[in-house]
Amino acid sequence: MCRCDVRFAKEIALATIPAKESKTAKESKLMRIGLFGGSFDPVHLGHLWIAEAARETLSLDQVRWIPTATSPLKPAGAVASSEDRLEMLQQALADNPSYELDDREIRRGEVSYTVDTVAELMQEMPDAQFFMIIGSDSLATFPLWHQPQRLLELITPAVVQRGGEGAIDFSVLQDLVDRERIAAIASHVIAMPVIELSSSELRERVQQGRSIRYRTPSGVEAVIQRRGLYRHPASSSYSPIASPDDASADRSPKH
């Protein structure tokens, strides 16, 4: 339960009611770009559903996928190599002209902070309006991000709300920005159904020699099989034959 007063809670609740945005003449000319960061290890259909829901909800011209090199909040790094993850993303995004793969954080080759990436993109594309696609669990840890206050000055988070979740607690931002800004952020919620799918589940299934068909694009599946990714040394029986569904613990986009 958030520690905001009743009036503040009502303001936020009203702000989360979906409504068409009224755009100024200047805003209508700006290219609207959603930034979707994560390890994508591997990319799966849940990521694609989120990206498409964000594109539709926010009227985005482009969703820019930004795979991380080393996440500041996940220092152990990815399981697959950067090269492998890039190839899987290329396969997953190839048939959608609204999707753009941006490998700048991997090329940077070090711990990357979202605020630096956003600032860099804003310099490169001054006529674009950016939104940051994140999960509600990432919002909960937002104050721990590098320079969170500056980041909120640069970009508007668009928070994914999965089916079955309670109201998103935007009060975690109240020490970073004022109520008006929080209400603006709360108006950019991306509603999603429950997605029982995760990268960790796919890795586990491959290790067990189980199917990942219909959980990730066929091109991604082909890369995993050809390169022998995520395969436990004792398991060499991977075959793309349908298997019973597996439950998932991690279902959100990572920054």
Image (tube, grey):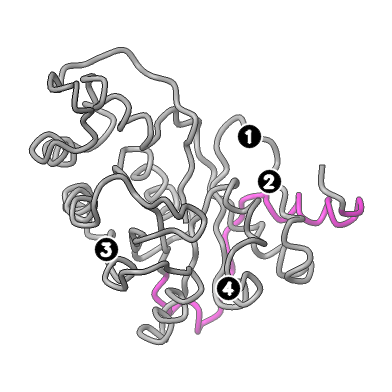
Report helix, strand or loop for mark 1. Answer: loop
| Residue 16, magenta (yes or no) | yes
Percent across and percent down for residue 98 are: 28, 60
Residue at which label 2 appears: 168
Q: Residue at x 83, y 51 (%)?
A: 9
**Dot 3, crowdedness within 10 Å: few (<14), some or many (≥20)?**
some
Residue at which label 4 appears: 151
Q: CA distance from mark 1 to mark 2?
A: 8 Å
Between tags 4 and 3, which lies in front?
4
**Dot 2, crowdedness within 10 Å: few (<14), some or many (≥20)?**
many
Quadrant location of residue 166? top right
As shown in the figure, which amino acid type bears the numbered disc 4?
Answer: Leu
Percent across and percent down for residue 77 are: 38, 52
Residue farthest to the front, as pictured: 233
Residue at which label 3 appears: 100
- Magenta residues span 4-32
Cβ–Cβ below 8 Å for labels 1 and 2?
Answer: yes
Percent across and percent down for residue 27 are: 50, 78
Residue at which label 1 appears: 165
Quadrant location of residue 150? bottom right
Q: CA distance from mark 4 to mark 1?
A: 26 Å
Percent across and percent down for residue 188 are: 58, 57
